[in-house]
Amino acid sequence: MEALHDDNVLDVRNLKMYFPITKGLLRRKVGDIKAVDDVSFMIKKHETLGLVGESGCGKTTTGRCILRLYRPTSGDIVFHGRDISKLSDHDLRPIRRHMSAIFQDPYGSLNPRQSAGTIAGLPLKIHHMVEKRDFNDKIAALFKMVGLNPSMMDRVPHEFSGGQRQRLGIARAIACQPSLIICDEPISALDVSIQAQIINLLEELQETIGLTYLFIAHDLSVVQHISNRVAVMYLGRIVEVASSQELYAAPLHPYTRALLSAIPIANPVLEKKRRRIVLKGEVPSPAHPPTGCHFHSRCELATADCREQRPPLRDVGRGHEVACFKV
């Protein structure tokens, strides 16, 4: 790895991920599903960037491209100063230990035939980071870090609760001491009572071992709590990026305002006074996205410019970026 001391852990530039649409017996290509369409953002060391948006907007695909589970159609993924977007699997191997993932489904992401200790320690074996005689001690230490009893190392996943399984997934993710973790909706499948515990654990680990997170979610209240900055995604594009505090206090893009208006407020007086923004229509298909601004077909402020030209993501002050002609 190069330049592990750099301030920017990740710099994504003009990332595109198109999936071909094929037809007929010969699988002739007839179009593309534009899952990620020219996305750019960066994440600083020890920072949490929240990536939010509706289901199907390309959040998970973006995370999988960064992990190089997908080979991007185009664009750059600069990880610690090195572009990994076009590297071969062989060249990626030494880099993979510096990044990992926590998956959405704590039930489906664990091998049901392996013991918990084997699951947590698999990355260590793959990257040859532990001697056989030290393996159990290392796994016991990992279990303690994530709040699991080391006596549970010999159990299999179905003997764990949902929250315990996600803790096991987190232990696996931090085993190789990565600098970047992609958290792909890590709490959406858990009970509400367990979600706060997992969020607190992620924050504690970030503080104690210096982690950097890309936190993918659709629960805006959770993202506000855990993120330093938030990027809002719509139909494969980033439409707004700002610090968590500023985005929630003064959203600028019409889509961001609509998302935030859907978050319930505990105060019934304030809840009654505020305006609920209900978007018209359905999310367009990524196979046939609208021209110009992708959001114009559902935006009450849209003009002719919005239909014809794509608004650039521009800085409007204090690091607040927005892609909208009306701002």
Image: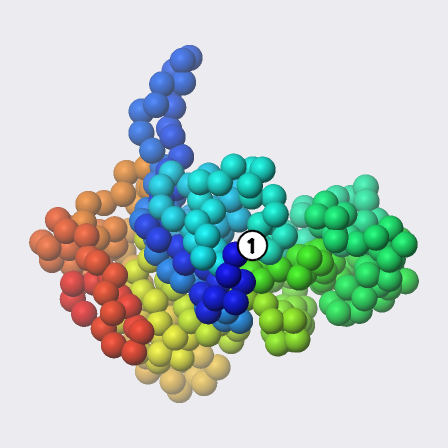
Q: Which of 306 and 122 is in front in this view?
A: 122
- For label 1, the SS is loop
Residue 43 located left or right of residue 120: left
**Residue that carries the numbered disc 1 in the rendered image:** 1
Q: How crowded is mark 1: few (under 14 residues within 10 Å), some or many (20 or more)?
A: few
Q: What residue sits 66% from the left and 75% below the top? A: 208
Image height check: is 223 above or below 185? below
Q: Which of 279 and 58 is in front in this view?
A: 58
- Residue 175 spot, x, y in % from top left: 71, 58
How many marks on residues?
A: 1
- Residue 291 spot, x, y in % from top left: 19, 45
**Colour pattern:** rainbow
Q: What residue sits 61% from the left and 47% below the top? A: 94
Q: What residue sits 59% from the left and 68% below the top? A: 211
Q: Which of 282 and 85 is in front in this view?
A: 85
Image height check: is 4 above or below 16? below
- Residue 225 spot, x, y in % from top left: 51, 76
Task: Identify the residue at the far left of this view.
Answer: 304
Q: Which of 253 and 272 is in front in this view?
A: 253
To which quarter of the image does residue 295 belong?
bottom left
Q: Is residue 61 visible?
A: no
- Residue 230 spot, x, y in % from top left: 41, 68
Q: Can residue 106 be seen in this view?
A: yes
Instruction: Tell me the amino acid under the disc marked 1.
Output: Met
> Quarter of the image containing the N terminus?
bottom right
